[in-house]
Amino acid sequence: MDINFTLIAQAIAFSVFIWFTIKYVWPPLLLAIEERQKTIADGLAAGERGKHDLELASQRSSEVLKEAKQRASEIIAQAEKRSGEIIDEAKVTAREEGGRILVGAKAEIEHEVFSARESLRQQVAELAVAGASKILRREVDAKAHESLLITIGEELK
């Protein structure tokens, strides 16, 4: 009977141990395991969200890069167009300035030609008067000659 009483006592002790474990030890272990599973699941979900966000950011960055390249090409095209306009404006301005310089040069040339003609007239008149005075010096007196020269000079002007 000893063996049976020991066996029954051990069975009762084992049953109490199982009941105690199920009642007081098992719930905190399950809670800890569930919390750990939840933490792992949250970490995996965050990893997936991070991967998804990375893909979205990669797509967005490629779109922004495309837009930047397009904008840069537009700016370059505008700059080339503007440089063409500036060159055309400079050509027009240069033509206008050249025309003004040409008109001014023509006016100056006409003035110089007029001055040269006047100077030549004056010199011709002086030579004519000098020649005439040499010829007339013998025939006219000085006072009559002087009044004649004044008259001729006024007529030439």
Image (spheres, rainbow, N blue to C red):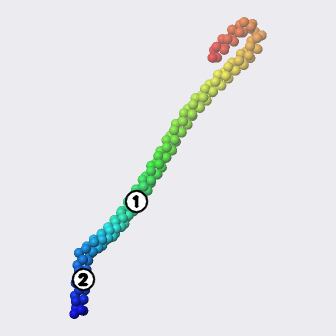
Q: Position of residue 28 (x, y in %)?
A: 28, 72
- Relative to 88, is 106 on the left or the right? right
Measuring from the top left, give residue 31's x and y in whole percent.
Answer: 27, 71
Residue 17 at x, y = what percent? 25, 80
Query: What number is the disc on residue 13?
Result: 2
* The N terminus: image quadrant: bottom left
In contact (CB < 8 Å): disc 2 and disc 1:
no
* Left or right placement of residue 147 versus residue 16 in this view: right
Q: Is residue 77 visible?
A: no
Nearer to the camera, 72 or 155? 72
Left or right placement of residue 85 versus residue 144 in this view: left
Q: Which mark is residue 140?
A: none
Q: Kindly report the distance in space between the C-alpha atoms of the residues bearing marks 2 and 1.
A: 68 Å
Residue found at x 57% / y 34%: 102
Quick check: 129 left or right of 6? Answer: right
Depth order, front residue of 139/38: 38
**Is residue 49 placed above or below 84 in the rendered structure?**
below
| Residue 114, picture quadrant | top right
For residue 104, above or below residue 14: above
Q: Quadrant of the C terminus?
A: top right
Mark closer to the observer (2, 1) = 2
Question: Looking at the image, which residue is at 24% across and 89% down?
Answer: 6
Residue on which the image places disc 1: 61
Q: Please tell me which residue is depicted at 64% across the width and 24% down the height of the picture.
A: 115
Q: Nearer the viewer, residue 137 or 45?
A: 45
Query: Mark 2 or 1 closer to N-term?
Result: 2
Q: Position of residue 77 (x, y in %)?
A: 45, 51
SS assignment at label 2: helix
Q: Please, what is the three-letter code of the amino acid marked with disc 2?
A: Ala
Q: Is residue 57 visible?
A: yes
- Quarter of the image for residue 94 reads top right
Query: Which residue is at a point 63% across and 14% down the rendered structure image?
Result: 155
